[in-house]
Amino acid sequence: MRYIFLFLIFLFSGNVTAQIDNPLDSLLSLDEYLGYVKTYHPIVKQANLIINESEAKLLKARGAFDPKLEVDYDRKKFKNTEYYDKLNATFKIPTWYGVEFKANFEENTGEFLNPEFSVPTDGLYSAGVSVSLAKGLLINERMAMLKQAKLFTRQAQADQQLLVNEILYEASITYFKWLKSFRNREVYQSFLSNATLRFNGIKRSYREGERAAIDTLEARLTLNTRKLDLEKARIKYIKSSLELSNFLWLNNDTPVELRSSIQPDTTTFNRIDDILNVTGFDSEDFDVEAHPKIQSLSLKYESLLLNKRLKQNNLLPKIDLQYNFLSQTPDETGTFNTQNYKAGLSISVPLFLRKERGDLRLAKLKLQDVEFERTTTRVNLKNKIDAVSQEIESYQIQNQLTQELVNDYEVMLKAEERKFFLGESSLFLVNSREAKLIENKIKAIDLENKYFTTKANLFNIMANVL
């Protein structure tokens, strides 16, 4: 009778373990979770501001080429005497190179007017051009700013991708911790059920005189140990759930608290490559030049190269030439001619050029710094890719071996339970076999988590777009 009763206990405890694997009421899969993070997380939205900032800077740089209308009016009257009344209106059109077109209207009157400001009664019209013949001809501040703004827009897209990738990586790691703590809790919960049934059965056998009192004590020790392990696992699961909630937001920037009924997807192992977009990755085919970090550094290098060209151009003397056709009647054809004009030439050059030479030297040093960083980043990326690839292969082997260990320990536990049923074993040996099985299941879960983390590292290094 005793053996039949104990056999039913072990048989029922195995059924309890199987019942844990029932379909979950509410699943939050990794791809669905990352979709929420990418769409609603504030840091992702903040990363998108980088592109908006670059577009604003581009608009600002283009503003340097906007046409300008300038009006200068000056008048002086004292004791009923008009000393002067001067009006100067100018319309300017900047162009890409150091050339500026302009049209001007000038009207000046007064008793004490400087003779050089004397113009016809109806005013004087002019149309002309100003040209920088040396410094500022092929490249100037306006040209450099606009080109750099365009480069910055492209660089911002690469930087935004890196920032979004980083937050998705952190979110993935948090999900894997949540999944690990959930599976650990499930393991301890299932074996607590087994220990509870076993303790109740042995206690009843003791009351019927079929078991010694020490057996009930040993069964209770195992039961309390399982309760303690489950409580520790439960707290870790709660903490990981709260950490996961940090990445969940709604469209109106409202944080979301994860409900206790929502559980992770335990089939993530089969879909991890597709979710993180690392399916069929081959380190030999990895194009490091296409990496967003390298692209960002290359665009930064181009921007600094423009800055260097500008500093080199500043070594040239400043030679500005102006030529304006003058006319009293601009509406008549042919009145603008070379007989009436206003021209000027301005030349300026520092004697030692110490400021210009210092700026050029600093520009060259910045270029070297970025080039060193770009070279180092290439090597680091390649080495990280190789290391992670080998680590993934190793964890695949370790996962397979650990799963075989779990299967073997399950067989050993069942065999020990049958021997215990036949009276050829002890409760101590059954508990020892079960403890080893639990230990290896936890190891298997931990190895799976490391495998997931390594996949996430590969995703982060590649800076993939989901």
Image (cartoon, rainbow, N blue to C red):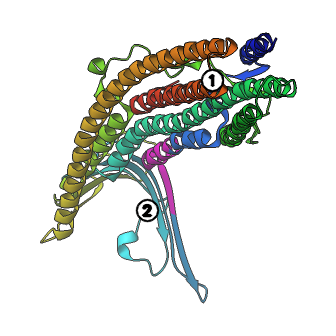
The residue lying furthest to the left in this view is: 352
Q: Nearer the viewer, mark 2 or mark 1?
A: 1
Q: Secondary structure at mark 1?
A: helix
Magenta residue span? 54-71
Q: CA distance from mark 2 to mark 1?
A: 117 Å
Q: Residue drawn at (28%, 48%), measured in percent from left and top?
A: 304
Q: Which mark is residue 120?
A: 2
Is the residue 140 above or below the residue 427 in the image? Answer: below
Q: Earlier in the sequence, mark 2 or mark 1?
A: 2
Q: Are marks 2 and 1 in contact (CB under 8 Å)?
A: no
Amino acid carrying mark 1 in the image: Val
Residue 266 in the magenta stretch? The answer is: no
Q: Residue drawn at (69%, 38%), measured in percent from left and top?
A: 225
Give the residue pinned by disc 1. Answer: 430
Residue 61 in the magenta stretch? The answer is: yes
Between 411 and 444, the one nearer to me in the picture: 411
Q: Where, by quadrant of the figure, is residue 386 drawn?
A: top left
Assign the magenta stretch its main secondary structure.
Answer: helix
Q: Return the x and y of residue 134 as percentages of the image width and height.
A: 18, 53
Amino acid carrying mark 2 in the image: Pro
Q: Where, by quadrant of the figure, is residue 174 drawn?
A: top right
Q: Return the x and y of residue 378 as percentages of the image width and height.
A: 26, 36
Q: Return the x and y of residue 51 as percentages of the image width and height.
A: 51, 39
